[in-house]
Amino acid sequence: MKRLTSWFRSRSLRSRLAMLTAAAVAVAIALSALACWFVVKDRLYQQVHDTLVGANLPPNPLVYCDSSVTGALSQAQAAPNAGRFPGNKWDVQLANADGLVCFPSGADRVIKTRPSDFTITDTTYRDGSYSDGEPAMVRLDLRTVNVDGRRHTVTLLTAVSVDNVEESLQQLALLLLGVAALGVVGAGVTGRLVARSALKPVDRLTDVVEHIARTEEVGTTIPVHGDDEIARLSSSFNSMSTALANSRDRQTRLIADAGHELRTPLTSLRTNVDLLIRSNDTGRPLPEATRTKLLGNMKAQMQELTLLIGDLLQLSRPDSPRPGQNPTVVALHEIADRAVERARLRGPGLHFELAIDPWYVHGDAPALERAVINLLDNAVKYSPPGGTVEVALQQGRLTVRDHGPGIPQDELQYVFDRFWRSPSSRQLPGSGLGLSIVAQTVRDAGGEVALGAPPDGLGTLATVRLPGQSDRP
C-alpha cells in the first residue's frame, strides 16, 4: 500500500487528476451497474413469485394420479403427465416424508424435496431445483388426501423454472460488465482531457513563476478569466507579484535616497579629516581656533549620521506589525508631556501652550513617542525666535502648531515621502525622514496623520488622530 501511495504521489498533477477522475467514474459505473443488476433480478424473481402466487390449483390434485393403485402412499405411481396441470406453466408434485405421492411422467421433472418441506404450517416459498439440476422457485402448500379410505397430510410442491431468469441475469451481467469497461476507458480519456483543460491556467501560472525565477522580473501578471478557484489563485498571484514589484521599487528607492543623503556628511567628514592629516604631515599645524571649529563640524556631522542611520533603521521595519506582536495600552497624554519637555530643551526661547487631556491608545510606546517628538522637532525648527508652539490632545486628536513660514500648498503632497525636503529648508539640519516615520507609526497604530495650514493661514498645523478612550482599559 505504501509503495502504491508513493507511486501515485510521484505522478504529475495532470496524471493524478486523470486517474482520480477515471477511478471516480469507474466506481460510479460499477455501483450503478450493480444496482441495476439487483433491481432487474428482484423484478424478474418477483414475476416468478407472482406466477406461483396466482397458480390456480385444484383442491384435490390427487385425481391426476393413478387411482387404481392402492396401498401405501410411498408406493403410488404417476399417471401420464400427472406433474403438470393442463394449460399451466408450473409443475406440481405431491409428497410426504415417506416418498413421492405423485410426480411427472418424466423423471427429469421431479422436484427435489427437503426435510423442511414436511414441517410447514402455511404456504411457503423457497428456491429449489428439479432432479436434473435446473433451478426453480417452489411453492409449498399443505393438502389432505384420501387413499384407500385413509386420510393423509401431504405437501403440494408447485415449481416454476427460473432457468430463463438465470440466463437473462448472466447476459445482463456480461452486458453491464462490458458497458462498465467501456465507461472506465472513456472516463480515463475524458479525465485526461478534463485535466489538461482544467490545468491550463496552472500551466500559465507555472510559466510565469519560472519566468520570474529565471529573469527576476517581478511584477509580471497573468490574465484572469472567471471567478473560480483557479481565477482566485491567479488574482492572488498577480497581487503578490505586484506587491513584490512595489517592495523592490521601494527598496531600490530607499537605498538610492539613503546613499544620496549619506554622501553629503561623509564627504564633509572626509574633507575635514584630510585637512587635519595634511596639516600633521606637513608639520604646519592648524590654528587652534580653526582646529576647534573643524572638530566641532566633525562632531555635528557624526551626530547627523547617527540620526540618519537611526531613521533608516526605523523605516526598515515592516509597514504593519509582525504577527505575534500585541500592542500595549499607551498613555498618549504622558507621551505628549515627555515630548514637550524634550522640545523645551531644544527650543529654549520658545513658548509652549498646552491643552492635553488623558487619552489611551493601543500601540508601540517608543515608536509613538518618537513620532510625537518628530512633530515637535519640526515645530521648534521652523518657529521664529520667541515664537509659540501650541500642543493639544483632545478626544484622540493631537495637534501641533507652529507660527513659522508654513509649507507651500504645492509641496504638501510630498511632506510624508522619504528623504523629501522642501527647497527652502535644505540648509537646515535633518534627513527628510522624520515625517515619514510619523506617518508609518501612526498607520501602524490604526490612526491618521495630516499636515497643512491652520485656519488663520499662519504657520503649520500637524494633526494626528488615534483610536482609543479617555479612561484606561
Image (cartoon, rainbow, N blue to C red):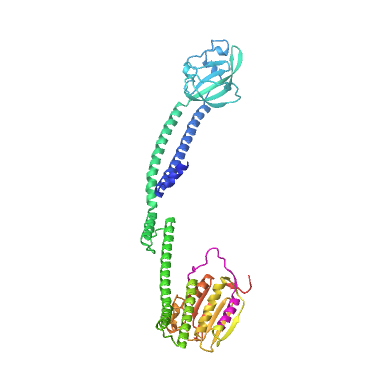
Q: In the displayed orientation, state which residue is furthest to the bottom.
A: 386
**Residue 32 vs residue 417, the one in the foreground:** 417
* Residue 428 visible, this orientation: no
Q: Magenta residues? A: 315-344
Q: Quadrant of residue 120?
A: top right
Pinpoint residue 218: horizontal percent, then vertical percent. Answer: 39, 63
Task: Mark yes or no: residue 74 visible.
Answer: yes
Q: How many marks?
A: 0
Q: Is 191 positioned to the left or the right of 128 in the image?
A: left
The C terminus, quarter of image: bottom right
Q: Residue 27 is drawn in which quadrant?
A: top left
In percent of width and height, residue 152 lies at 60, 16
Quick check: 466 above or below 42? below
Residue 112 location in percent, x, y? 52, 20
Residue most toward the front? 283
Q: Is residue 313 magenta?
A: no
377 vs 44, nearest the viewer: 377
The front one of 178 and 318 is 318
Going by the image, does 261 lie left or right of 448?
A: left
Is 31 above or below relative to 429?
above
**Vertical arrangement, residue 246 with respect to residue 91, above or below:** below
Q: Residue at x 46, y 85 (%)?
A: 291
Q: What percent of the width, then of the height, locates residue 212?
A: 38, 60
Viewer-proximal residue among 64 and 299: 299
Q: Is residue 321 magenta?
A: yes
